[in-house]
Amino acid sequence: MSCTFCTWPWFEGEGLSVRAENRNKSWTKLKSMVHWSPLAFTLKSRSSWVQLAGHAGNFQAKEGGRLLKRYCECEQQCLNKLMTDSLRPYVPGYYGVVQKDEQDYNLMDDLLVGFDSPSIMDCKMGSRTYLEEELMKARERPRLRKDMYEKMVSVDPGAPTEEERAQQGVLKPRYMQWRETLSSTATLGFRIEGIKKADGTCNTNFKKTKQREQVMKALDDFVDGNVQILKLYLKRLEELRSVLEKSHFFNTHEVVGSSLLFVHDASGKASIWMIDFGKMVPLPPPMMLDHRTPWVEGNREDGYLWGMDNLIDILSSMLPQTPCEVDRNSEEA
């Protein structure tokens, strides 16, 4: 399996966590969730978590609060380096490569351990979700893609050009770049992939969630207006941003397709981790990125920190202001 598809187990094509009780009763619903939704579906029981893969064999359960993720060399190399980087507290613990049923897996922490019926959100970070290398390869072998044309039309019937409409197909680079313009990836440098709440409700309809107000509404729904959870998330993001800015590893890698996993539960526990490193590519020395400069083909900037700046700003604006803050803002205005 290509590294392109190496993703975390609670989201589309990434598998899901379920518990054993009532498994047969819920199987029809679970199959539907795997096929149609990028979010995992969780069920309570007395047994340990069982990992079922959205792509067969992509994930396996492991005792001791760990999971097996199908081997991806790029991810393995990144996780090895991250274990000795300042980012270590913000990524899943990694324990090397193990083999099961003649298949190699990366062994890492299950980040849901310690949470009771958690609410989960996946935010894909950055201003693009494809590597420059992918774009160049697609251009080397230009081929009209009918499947991508049909996807484009299903989302926006007016998107294809007259030529594309006549050909009933689009080139992959054109599709890849068009796709990013639909969501807040283009406007804010991140996008919500999906949300699973503690009550079992899932929302994956964020393909056209593009404007700041739409994102804010989705985030408010995710935390159910809980200010304390919001504050914990904001604190964690600010800490992570500070570490990212100083991390040599981060600044010497093109970071694409990586997500932030938000997790909280009714006890008030909340945290955020970086996940999905299958497209985290090292740069040729001495090249370094600031992750904020707008992307121009060739500069390899990914907009990761630009997205985080916007995410932090949005969460900050959602917090109720104190009287002093209101007065200060009025004076500044």
Image (tube, rainbow, N blue to C red):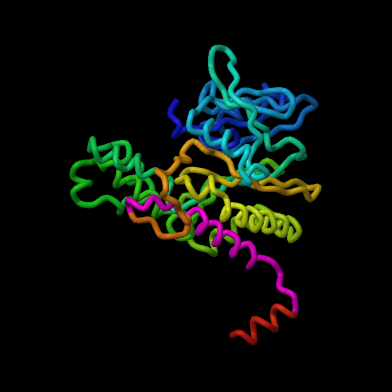
Residue 104 location, x and y as percent?
54, 19
Determine whether, in the image, residue 321 is placed left or right of residue 154.
right
Point 48% across, 41% down: residue: 280
Q: Give left or right: position of 312 versus 179.
A: right
State the residue in front, 4 or 38.
4
In this orientation, which residue lies closer to the viewer: 249 or 43? 249
Is residue 47 within the magenta segment? no
- x 54%, y 25%: residue: 70
Q: Quadrant of residue 26?
A: top right
What quarter of the picture does the N terminus occupy? top left
Seen in the picture, residue 312 relative to 152 is either above or below; the reply is below
Residue placed furthest toward the top = 101
In this orientation, does residue 184 appear? no
Question: Above or below — where is 164 with respect to 329?
Answer: above
Q: Is residue 310 above or below residue 276?
A: below
- Magenta-colored span: 297-323
At a point 61% along the width and 43% down the height, the residue shown is 85
